Image: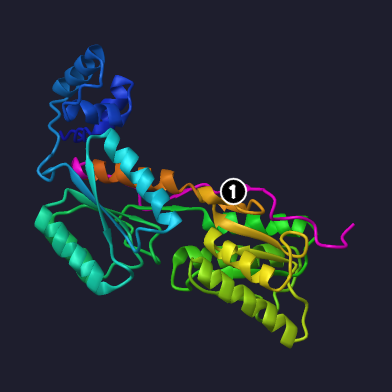
Amino acid sequence: MSSRPAAKVTIGTIAAEAGVSTATVSKVLNGRADVSTATRDRIRQIMARHHYQPRRARRRGGVVDLVLNELDSLWSIEIIRGAEEALRDEGVSMMLSAVHGSSAGTNAWLDQLAARRSDGAILVVSDLTPRQRTKLATLGIPFVLVDPVGNVDPTVPTIGATNWAGAVAATEHLIGLGHRHIAHLGGPRQLLCSRARADGFHAAMEAAGLPVPDGAVRHGEFNDSSGHTEMAALLDHAKYAGGSSPTAVFAASDLQAFGAYTALRERGLRVPDDVSVVGFDDVPVTRWSDPALTTVRQPLQDMAGMAATTLLRLIDGEDVNLPRVELATHLIIRGSTAAPAGAG
């Protein structure tokens, strides 16, 4: 007669039985003092009853790497804040690395990671090659991806946001105001988030029965310089093609939206009187811009925080069944959008 194998006991099992968070169990395992004596004793009793032995072979120096394409963008700063806060609460230090979109930079970071024996890595990079993934596996370094380029191995935990739904909400907002000539400033074509935002824009326009003329969608980089260049090109294309200039623009990032502001003002156009503008991300400066930017709030700090806590669970030997998590986006309406001139 065979018996079913006992269910594997994890930190989550202990937390559920003790009625506390996994973070609290982790604090007890790490010997942190900021847990009450009664709670600590209850958790230890449950662990003893289950004969729970956490796997800590990978826990070396209490250091995790955060790897980004660049460190000085407003987007990156929000990611850094979210990850640092989550790791600090667990008594883990964080090292920052920038790869600047180059394979050489990424390989240099891998060499540095190996040298300092990091416990794990949060990767916010443009791409991760199979060879680099193999090296991480060889080093025994667990990792979590944030906003990856494209489809990834379903066994790799990935944290993102509802980019498509956010783009639909932004475009529907402009349509609801009465705009019919709407353009889109997209991000890099190779990025999954850029493609999802462009697809959301097209889906909303199609659902409303509105055409997207040739040249009404332009792709660039997630920065203000690119936003300026592509917005100017949009206006020039409409002029020389004899078409209608856009009365509204959905930009795939806040920085692109700010670049569009500058290009519009250089042409003597006002936001939102002549052209409404919507961004994406909701970095802190959006509320202080002139006018304050209507944008899609992407929970950047929450994304980074979830990536950090997921990574710590991997480091502690837990099985994390999270192939991809998408956190919700929300439209934040401010002063950069209004009904088109002459409407009503």
Q: Residue at x 16, y 51 (%)?
A: 118
Q: Is residue 134 left or right of residue 292?
A: left
Tell me the crowding category of disc 1: few under 14, some 14 to 19, or many 20 or more residues within 10 angstroms, Cα based.
few
Kindly state the secondary structure of the residue where label 1 is placed: helix
Q: Quadrant of residue 238?
A: bottom right
Decide whether residue 310 is among the magenta residues.
no
In this view, the residue in front, 102 or 17, is 102
Q: Would you name the residue on which mark 1 appears?
A: 288
Mark 1: amino acid: Trp
In the rendered image, residue 273, in percent from the top left (x then y), is placed at 78, 60
Q: How many marks overall?
A: 1
Q: Residue at x 14, y 21 (%)?
A: 48
Q: Please tell me whether the stretch drawn in magenta is mainly helix, strand or loop.
A: loop
**295 above or below 48?**
below
In the rendered image, residue 37, in percent from the top left (x then y), is placed at 22, 13
Furthest-bottom residue in view?
Answer: 240
Whether residue 137 can be seen here: no
Q: Residue at x 64, y 68 (%)?
A: 202
Q: Please give the range of residues in magenta.
A: 315-344
Q: Quadrant of residue 57?
A: top left
Q: In the picture, which quadrant includes the C terminus?
A: bottom right
Q: In the picture, which quadrant includes the N terminus?
A: top left
**311 above or below 103?**
above
**56 above or below 42?**
below
In this view, the residue in front, 95 or 324, is 95
Q: Residue at x 18, y 45 (%)?
A: 63
In the rendered image, residue 175, in percent from the top left (x then y), is placed at 75, 59
Q: Is residue 197 left or right of residue 40?
A: right
Whether residue 333 can be seen here: yes
In the rendered image, residue 145, in percent from the top left (x then y), is placed at 33, 56
